[in-house]
Image (cartoon, rainbow, N blue to C red):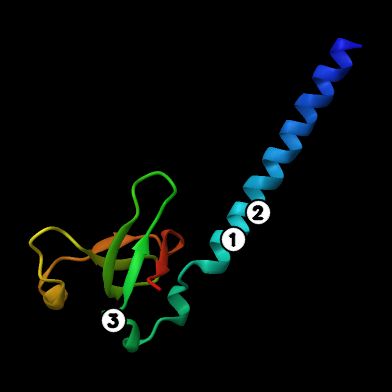
């Protein structure tokens, strides 16, 4: 009987974990920035970087290509009104959301 309960709990945890990961992935896809939808008007827009591991960071869109969005991240002493003067960091679009 114990083995049955242990197996049942393992299966439940496996299914629940898989469902949660799938739900998290779908939520991220819904809110991520899509490169194909970016226009010149998005240059300078504030974004939040959040890959789920590091501390979220705020930055501004400088440019993009087919694969990455180049973001100038806010740093101490950096005048973000002059973000075009700084180098943008290649960032995966799935790790970015527009700043509210």
Secondary structure of the residue carrying numbered label 2: helix
Spatial distance from mark 1 to mark 3, Cα to Cα? 25 Å
- Mark earlier in primary sequence (1, 3): 1
Spatial distance from mark 2 to mark 3, Cα to Cα? 30 Å
Which residue in the rendered view is the most extreme toward the front?
100
Q: Position of residue 30 (x, y in %)?
A: 57, 67
Name the residue nearer the viewer: 61 or 5. Answer: 5
Residue at image coords 7%, 61% = 77
Q: Which residue is mark 2?
A: 23
Position of the C terminus by quadrant: bottom left
Neighbour tally class for label 1: few under 14, some 14-19, many 20 plus, Cα within 10 Å: few
Q: Which residue is mark 1?
A: 27
Secondary structure of the residue carrying numbered label 1: helix
Neighbour tally class for label 3: few under 14, some 14-19, many 20 plus, Cα within 10 Å: some
Marks 2 and 3: which is nearer the front?
Answer: 2
In the rendered image of this protein, does residue 53 appear above or below residue 81?
above
Asked whether disc 2 touches disc 1, contact meaning CB atoms under 8 Å apart, the reply is yes
Q: Position of residue 22 (x, y in %)?
A: 66, 51
Residue at image coords 34%, 82% = 42
Q: Quadrant of residue 3?
A: top right
Q: Which residue is mark 3?
A: 43
């Amino acid at each position: 009987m114990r083995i049955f309960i242990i197996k049942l709990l393992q299966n439940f945890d496996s299914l629940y974990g898989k469902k949660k990961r799938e739900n998290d992935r779908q939520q991220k896809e819904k809110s991520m920035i899509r490169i194909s939808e970016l226009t010149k008007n998005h240059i300078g827009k504030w974004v939040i970087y959040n890959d789920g591991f590091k501390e979220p960071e705020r930055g501004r869109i400088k440019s993009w290509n087919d694969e990455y969005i180049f973001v100038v991240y806010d740093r101490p002493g950096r005048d973000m009104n002059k973000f075009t003067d700084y180098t943008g960091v290649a960032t995966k679009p799935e790790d970015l959301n527009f700043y509210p």
